[in-house]
Amino acid sequence: MAPKSHKAVLAIVRRTMPIRYMLCAVLVAGVLPTASAAQPQLVPGSLEVHWNEGAKDCTASPQPPIQLHSYNRDTFIVRENLCATFEAPFMYLLIGSAKALLIDTGDVADPNRMPLAKTVMHLIPGEGSAKLPLLVVHTHRHLDHRAGDAQFAHLSNVQVVGFDTDSVRRYYHFDDRPNGLAPVDLGDRTVDAIPTPGHNETEVSFYDRNTGLFFSGDFLMPARLLIDDSGEYLASAKRVAAFVGDRPISFVLGGHIEMDTYGETFPWQSQYHPHEHVLQMTKDDLLALPAAIASFNGFYTTNGKFIMMNSMRILIVFALLAGVALIALVVLLVLFMRRRRRARRLPAAAQS
């Protein structure tokens, strides 16, 4: 009886197995497209790079002006050397099938000192009139992110977007700025431009759907966050946190590095960065930014890895303190001179 029952069970299993396989196949076929739609496959890349740390004495230790890192075959990171400019800004070149995009042009205008355009154009596919068009944009209008514009201005098949508020609004159609989202089509590669004012009113961040890289300029970086308008900065941080919430983020790449691996900032205008912090930050850092900005006291605040300051207000406070100190010194000097005069008059009065 047992063997017969066992055979019967096996027969049922054999009959039902094809049905089960078919059901599984249907389920998998239905689930996989949904998953891939929600979490698209990102083109991978590498940030295994040691950035040039500059030098204690740049005159005694000449440095190459540019360091180039290939994240992948269509994405490049360019950094200006610390000995060429203490700002040492990062720039990003993204290449699509129809167009290339350069984010920022750095802090050095002279092509002899900083061959930025030559380096970038060499990376773009094609020769002569067949070379892929280049679009040059900026994270914001500060000079250390646009000084190299002139190197591209007269090149054929290159468009340089203006860095002033009106130019930014017109090009991206940010009619409801600071709200808005502008897709930039590079051909088989779309980059979203997002207004993120707060550091500067013209600040724009960029999200590459192809790689999941978020280019944050001076909005977020391993450096001092210079806050011009804390209300706008907080609103931008909240918008960005909402934007990245359901999107894959590989890395957050900013405009500068000013910290070492221990989280300490390098001296202002330092051209030597030993043990420098890595460039990349994370999606969690973007999500934590609103709470950090909300804690800003208006002058100088540290909150975890975030160092926030309003340099203009700090300068005003120092100027006021210097003014008060000067006035106090003048008052003390006047009182001292009066005492001396009084002391001289007393002996003269006694003799008379």
Image: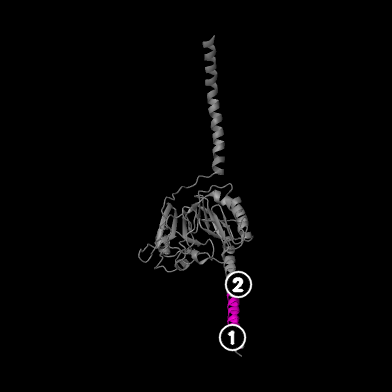
Mark 1 belongs to which amino acid?
A: Pro
Q: Is residue 43 above or below residue 11?
A: below
Would you call the spot at circle 2 few (<14 residues within 10 Å), some (14-19), or many (20 or more)?
A: few
| Colouring | one colour
Would you call the spot at circle 1 few (<14 residues within 10 Å), some (14-19), or many (20 or more)?
A: few
Mark 2 belongs to which amino acid?
A: Val
Name the residue rendered at 53%, 32% in the picture. Answer: 25
Q: Which residues are magenta?
A: 327-348
N-terminal label among 2 and 1? 2
Give how far across and how far down residue 347 sits, in percent.
59, 86
Task: Provide the secondary structure element on which disc 1 rests.
Answer: helix
Q: Which mark is residue 324?
A: 2
Q: Which residue is mark 1?
A: 347
Give how far across and how far down residue 213 sits, in percent.
50, 51
Res. 55 image quadrant: bottom left
Q: Residue furthest top?
A: 1
Magenta-drawn stretch contains 259: no
Would residue 126 be visible to someone looking at this image?
Answer: no
Q: Which mark is residue 25?
A: none
